Image: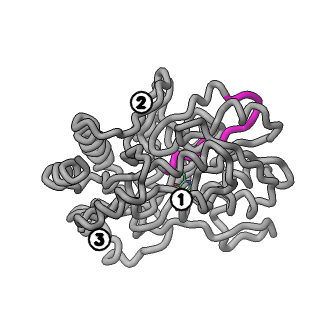
Amino acid sequence: MIPHNKPTLGKQEELAAKRIIQSGWLAEGTEVEKFEHNFCDFIGISHGHAVAVSSGTSALYLALWVLNAKKKKVAFPSYVCASLRYAVNMAQAKEEIIDIEKGYPNISINELNKSDCSIAIVPHIYGNPVELDKIKNKLIIEDCCQSIGAKFNGKHVGLIGEIGIFSFFATKLMTSGGQGGMIVSKNKSLIDEIRDYRKFDMRNDKKMRFNFQMTDLQASIGIEQLKKLPGFLNRREEIFNFYLNAGLPIQTNKKVSNSNPIRYRAILISENPKELIKKLYDNRIKAIVPIEDWELLSPTKNAINYCKKTISLPLYPSLTDEEVNYIIKTIQ
Ligand SMILES: Cc1ncc(COP(=O)(O)O)c(C=O)c1O
């Protein structure tokens, strides 16, 4: 069976993890610090502007916490994973759910601009940057869990809004050993506050904190994956273009000027997704409906229609040319 997704790991990750295990220091330490520095280098900001945490969800919670979201209205799209809702509720904020654009997975900026929310969580879904410069009068948390490396107006996503958050879950664009997250901001004082929150143990100031730490073992794998990320993104682009050039109805980036998307998913538009998914499965290919209508955070009109027409094809760096050709031939 060709899986729908899988992490791409090799000898380098294995050796890095072995080195940490042999060192006798597994918990958060110098390796996490190095990962944070390297991440800053990758997205193009000075050291000190990134803090590593245990997951994308904890990154979201901490972003809301540091922006004092408690009791405030926080908007986010209906078409996204449930972790946004969990983080908003953990932060004791009030949720407001916004529809996506017609026929496109990103949040509707028109609808968002009608909202009087103080904070908006804006995910760049499937690697497609949202036109952040059109969003008015709100603090923006950029959710870059599916878009590391994408750019808008020449800048890496994550650095345009107030805060950017990233996920290193096993099947994301890169992983830090199965789970992990990163928070970045141009505003270093926000990052310093989160770093202080993360250092929960041995404090005598009675402030409330929580253990959202990443371990050195995870960071050592993250460091190796980050080195490989440019190659991963190129390979993803190549596979995406194989599908596209074969004439498959793959959704490309909506014409967002000055945007450089990356390819987290290859979304095929079909009038009958379930039937095609079944036929692919019978031919040992796993494709999925990326978000089913029952998973939507609210049954908004455009999101329901979008769910009914989308199939996500296998797309990951270790997918071979032979496998891609076989997938294309089977669909054709
Ligand atoms: C857009 C988006 N936001 C947030 C998350 C949460 O990240 P994590 O699974 O690392 O908690 C995910 C992934 O699951 C995601 O796809």
Is 243 or 156 nearer to us in this picture? Answer: 243
Of labels 3 and 1, earlier in sequence is 3
Q: Please indicate, yes or no, whether residue 9 appears anywhere in the rendered image.
A: yes
Q: How crowded is mark 1: few (under 14 residues within 10 Å), some or many (20 or more)?
A: some
CB-based contact (under 8 Å), mark 3 and mark 1: no
72 in relation to 202, above or below: above
Q: At 60% from the left edge and 47% from the top edge, which residue is drawn? A: 303
Look at label 3 and name its amino acid: Arg
Q: Is the CB of mark 2 within 8 Å of ligand 1?
A: no
Q: Residue 214 in magenta?
A: no
First to last magenta residue range: 135-145
Q: Residue 140 in magenta?
A: yes
Of labels 2 and 3, earlier in sequence is 3
Which residue matches tag 3? 19
Where residue 206 is drawn, which disc sits there? none
Circle nearer the viewer, 3 or 1: 1
Residue 311, x across and y down, in percent: 41, 52
C-alpha distance separating marks 2 and 3? 36 Å
Where residue 260 is drawn, which disc sits there? 2
The quadrant of the rendered image in which ligand 1 is seen is: bottom right
Of labels 2 and 1, earlier in sequence is 2
Q: In which quarter of the image is the N terminus?
A: bottom left
Q: At 62% from the left edge and 61% from the top edge, which residue is drawn? A: 82
Report which quarter residue 134 is drawn in.
top right
Q: How crowded is mark 3: few (under 14 residues within 10 Å), some or many (20 or more)?
A: some
Q: Specify the farthest residue to the top.
A: 257
Assign a secondary structure to mark 2: strand
